[in-house]
Image: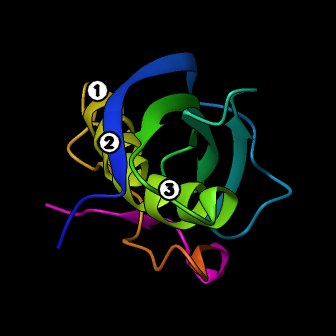
Amino acid sequence: MEAILKFTGYKIVNLEYSRDIDLLDKDENELEVGVGTAISDDGEQGQVKISVTALDVENKRTVKAEVLGSFDFIDVEDKERTLAVNGTAILYPYVRAIISTITTQDSLNAIILPTVNTLNFLKNEVVTSEE
């Protein structure tokens, strides 16, 4: 099986971490994930941007991240779908690692984003590890 998408790297566009914030109006953890895609004018490259906001109510903290992944297309017919599904599947583990790394810097409890089915990932909730 030949690759149809080549991952060329990612950049953290935005990263915010807040602790001891007022979450009085929230009674459970929340996770918002957004995905956007773009294709170059020549159709040879694509980008996926994943935006995540995770609220950890029990530990009174929130983390927001925007990560932009870059890709080269290799013999792809449906570029938009390939980028949205496969590109997201490739980039999302990096976003998960960034979030868990940042949130363990001042706590034993990492915010761990769920693994996802890129066709249906918005139905998941944020999980906090406990040691």
Whether pointer 3 and pointer 2 mark residues with C-beta atoms closer than 8 Å, the reply is no
The answer to which of marks 1 and 3 sits earlier in the sequence is: 3
Image position of 16 with respect to 98: above or below: above
Q: Which secondary structure, mark 3?
A: helix
The image position of residue 131, as x and y in percent, is 13, 60
The image position of residue 66, as x and y in percent, is 60, 30
Q: Which of 44 and 7 is in front in this view?
A: 44
| Residue at the spot 51% in from the left edge and 66% down from the top edge | 126
Image position of 32 with respect to 8: above or below: below
Residue neighbourhood size for the residue with mark 1, other residues' Cα within 10 Å, grouped as few (<14), some (14–19), many (≥20): few
The image position of residue 116, as x and y in percent, is 44, 74
Whether pointer 1 and pointer 2 mark residues with C-beta atoms closer than 8 Å, the reply is no
Q: What label sits on residue 51 in the rendered view? A: none
Amino acid at pointer 3: Thr
> Mark 3 = which residue?
88
The image position of residue 11, as x and y in percent, is 45, 18
Q: Nearer the viewer, residue 54 or 81?
A: 81
Closer to us: mark 1 or mark 3?
A: 3
The answer to which of marks 1 and 2 sits earlier in the sequence is: 2
Q: In which quarter of the image is the N terminus?
A: bottom left
> Mark 2 = which residue?
6
Separation of marks 1 and 2 at Cα, in angstroms: 35 Å
Bounds of the magenta segment: 122-131
Residue neighbourhood size for the residue with mark 3, other residues' Cα within 10 Å, grouped as few (<14), some (14–19), many (≥20): many
Q: What label sits on residue 106 in the rendered view? A: 1
Q: Nearer the viewer, residue 3 or 112?
A: 3
